[in-house]
Structures are given as structure tokens and as C-alpha cells.
Image: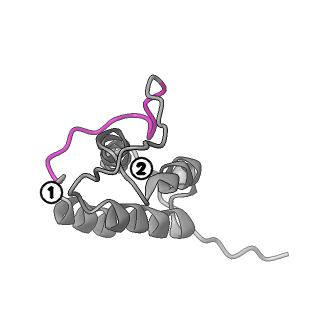
Amino acid sequence: MCQRRYVGDILRCFGLEECKAVASPVDVSSRLMSSNTASKIDVPFREAVGALMHLTTTTRPDIAYAVSFVSRFMENPQEEHWVAVKRFFRYLENPQEEHWVAVKLII
């Protein structure tokens, strides 16, 4: 089972179709924390996280923890949260994605 086309569609939707792929979904040097500032960034943060959540429940459980962590910031997303979401998309662009195959077992 492959959702390569869906990934391509969401990359185009968020203007990231020419992004450079990365090997891991999370930058271990980043520290994401909630912000007390009332300013929000003007990006489709909720839509992006929703698209990523759809992938986690269908074919990409490898990003589930990272997506659930960043979803905590949906109420007041800041620039560093958007950078983390864009990194998830860059990870999905990685051409070494594995496909899920369903096999019927005869016992």
C-alpha cells in the first residue's frame, strides 16, 4: 500500500513540492515549547497537521509520535512549530519510503 500520490498532493498544497528530503522526521536539536505570546503565524498549521494525522492512521505510523507531539501547539502555533511540521513533510519526501504489502497467509 503506497500513498506516494497523496504525499505529493499535500506537498503541492503546502508549497513544499521542491523541498529537500531529510532522513528523520524530527530535528533532535530543536526544543519545541508552547508560547505565551498571543501572536499567531499566518500558515495553514491545522490543515498540515490534519494531513499528517491522516497519514499516521493509514500508512505512516513512523511519524505518529512526532505528529502527536506537534499537534499540542494547534491553539497557538509559532514559527518553530511550523518549521517542525515542514520537516515532517521533508521526511515524507524521502525516496526510500517503504510500501506496505498485505499478504494472505494460508494456515
Q: Which residue is rendered at x = 43% and y = 30% of the image?
A: 27
Q: Which residue is rendered at x = 34% and y = 51% of the image?
A: 38
Given residues 93 and 40, the one toward you in this image is 40
The region drawn magenta spans: 17-28
Q: Quadrant of residue 7?
A: bottom left
Given residues 102 and 29, the one toward you in this image is 29
Say which mark, if any, is on residue 97.
2
Q: Which residue is rendered at x = 36% and y = 51% of the image?
A: 77
Q: Position of residue 19 (x, y in %)?
A: 19, 44
Q: How far is disc 1 from disc 2 in space, using C-alphas?
A: 21 Å
Q: Residues within 10 Å of mark 2 (few under 14, many from 20)?
A: few
According to the image, label 1 marks what residue? 15
Element at badge 2?
Answer: loop
Instruction: Point out the image quarter for the C terminus.
Output: bottom right
Q: Name the residue type under label 2.
A: Glu
Say which mark, if any, is on residue 67.
none
